[in-house]
Structure formats: structure tokens, C-alpha cells
Image: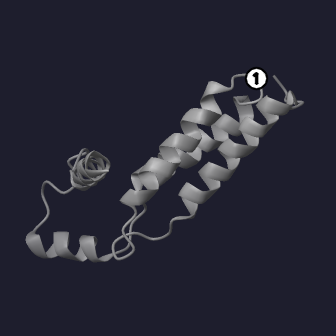
């Protein structure tokens, strides 16, 4: 369990890094102002997209919903109530992945355009 929390700490440190370089020319006061505004957890957005892919392609490829559920359930622990807006992206990603997994197990499928 200690390794799990170490991994969550690593994910939180990755979340705090400035990957795009947007804050390069900002003053300290501007950076503090930006940090005060609630933001969205990037792992929640990735989980939501993965859940949508699991719902769409999960009935045909069963590995995608499993990856979606595992990813969302692990990264939901990176959610910080003080700094971030809402955890619903994680929950919706989990539900969509579970629906895709249940459809794969039941052998059901979508009538999609492609």
C-alpha cells in the first residue's frame, strides 16, 4: 500500500509541472492569482476520454474498458478538493468504462455509423 501512495504522490508532482511553458513570462503575483482559481484535474479528463473510448469500442475490444476502469480508479486519488473543480470526470469515466465492459461480457454491441 505504501508503493501505491508513492505512485499517487508521483502523479501529483507530474500534475504540478508546467509542461506547456505558459507561465514562463508571468510575474509571481500573476502566478499566485492563476493558482487560486480552481482547475480541472488532467487525469480526470484523460479518464473521461478513455471512458468514452471504452463505451464506444469496448463492446468489440474488451481490453479498453478494463484499462479505463483501472486508470480512473487509480487516478481518482489524485483529486485535490481545494485546488480542483470537480471529481465528476472520474466518475463518468468509470461508469462509461463499466458499461462498455458489461456490453463486452454480454456480447452486445452498438449500431454505430462506422
Q: Residue furthest front?
A: 1
Residue 89 image-quadrant placement: bottom right
Q: Residue most toward the left?
A: 28
Does residue 109 appear in this view? no
User: Is 34 placed left or right of 49 in the picture?
Assistant: left
Q: Which residue is mark 1?
A: 60
Q: Quadrant of the C terminus?
A: top right
Residue at the spot 44% in from the left edge and 48% down from the top edge? 74
What x and y, as percent, mark residue 3?
A: 26, 45
- Residue 63 lies, in percent from the top left, at 62, 26
Place residue 68 in its image quadrant: top right
* Number of residues whose C-alpha sits closer than 10 Å to that of mark 1, classed few (under 14), some (14–19) or many (20 or more): some
Q: Where does residue 77 sit, x and y in percent of width and height? A: 40, 58
108 vs 83: above or below: above
Residue drawn at x 22%, y 52% as measured from the top left: 13
Q: Secondary structure at mark 1?
A: loop
Colour pattern of the rendering: one colour
Residue 25 lies left or right of residue 75; in this view the side is: left
Q: Residue at x 29, y 53 (%)?
A: 5
On screen, 87 above or below 81? above
Residue 7 seen: yes
**Residue 76 shown left or right of residue 93 in the figure:** left
Q: Position of residue 7 (x, y in %)?
A: 28, 46
Of the pair 105 and 99, the residue shown nearer to us: 105
Amino acid at each position: 500500500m505504501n508503493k501505491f501512495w508513492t505512485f499517487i504522490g508521483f502523479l501529483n508532482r507530474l500534475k504540478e509541472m508546467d509542461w506547456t511553458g505558459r507561465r514562463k513570462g508571468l510575474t509571481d503575483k500573476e502566478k499566485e492569482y492563476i493558482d487560486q482559481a480552481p482547475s480541472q484535474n488532467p487525469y480526470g479528463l484523460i479518464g473521461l476520454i478513455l471512458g468514452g473510448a471504452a463505451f464506444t469500442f469496448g463492446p468489440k475490444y474488451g481490453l479498453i474498458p478494463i484499462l479505463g476502469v483501472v486508470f480512473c480508479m487509480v487516478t481518482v486519488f489524485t483529486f485535490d478538493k481545494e485546488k480542483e473543480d470537480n471529481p465528476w470526470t472520474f466518475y463518468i469515466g468509470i461508469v462509461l468504462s463499466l458499461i462498455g465492459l458489461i456490453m463486452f461480457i454480454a456480447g452486445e454491441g452498438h449500431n454505430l455509423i462506422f
